Image (tube, rainbow, N blue to C red):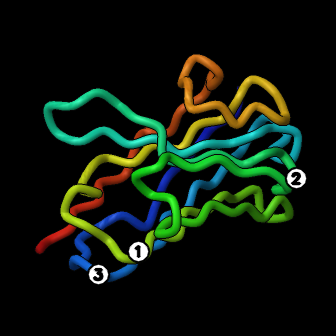
């Protein structure tokens, strides 16, 4: 098991930036691929981005490609999501998740078996 805690959410402006963090404890962080998902009001949870255990592979949803960047610092057991050029449609609760394998950077949430509690991101126009 791995415990995940997201932080860094809040209110942003369209065109601005926010950075989310996901702090992990428990299962060895460096052995696990990680991902970010989000859920907007009235919508299903959707994939945002994922990163392999050592950061050499990433995957992004088309809706955030070129604007968001996922990274990780294994020495700090922390993953990040840098969000630039924010849009109102980025408003959602953002969740970090630990994958079931070191290199699974799938958009399918069935590949993830531990989830954080989420952090709210609200983007005003």
Q: Residue 54, which numbered label?
A: 2
At x 36%, y 52%, the residue is: 119
Numbered circle sitting on residue 87: none
Residue 12 located left or right of residue 110: left
Question: Which residue does the image show at 58% across and 17% down from the upper left?
Answer: 110
Quarter assignment of residue 39: top left
Q: Residues within 10 Å of mark 1 (few under 14, many from 20)?
A: some
The crowd level at tag 2 (other Cα within 10 Å; few <14, some 14-19, many 20+) is some
Among numbered discs 1 and 2, the one appearing first in the sequence: 1
Residue 34 location, x and y as percent? Answer: 68, 42
Q: Residue at x 49, y 46 (%)?
A: 61
User: Gap between marks 3 and 1, in whole Å?
Assistant: 10 Å
Q: Given this view, does label 3 or label 1 mark the residue nearer the observer? A: 3
Q: Residue at x 76, y 37 (%)?
A: 26
Name the outermost residue toward the bottom.
16
The residue under label 3 is: 15
User: Which residue is disc 1 drawn over?
Assistant: 18
Say above or below: 45 vs 62.
Answer: above
Q: Of residues 83 and 30, which is closer to you in this image?
A: 83
Where residue 53 sits in the image (x, y, percent)?
Answer: 83, 45
Hey, which quadrant is residue 101 in on the image? top right
């Amino acid at each position: 098991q791995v415990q995940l805690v997201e932080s860094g959410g809040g209110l942003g402006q369209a065109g601005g930036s926010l950075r989310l963090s996901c702090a992990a404890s428990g299962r060895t962080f460096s052995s696990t691929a990680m991902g970010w998902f989000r859920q907007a009001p009235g919508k299903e949870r959707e994939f945002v981005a994922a990163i392999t255990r050592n950061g050499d592979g990433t995957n992004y949803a088309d809706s955030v490609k070129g604007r968001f960047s996922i990274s990780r610092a294994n020495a700090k057991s922390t993953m990040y999501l840098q969000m630039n050029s924010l849009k109102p449609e980025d408003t959602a609760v953002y969740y970090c998740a630990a994958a079931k394998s070191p290199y699974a950077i799938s958009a399918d949430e069935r590949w993830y078996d531990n989830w954080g509690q989420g952090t709210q991101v609200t983007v005003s126009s």
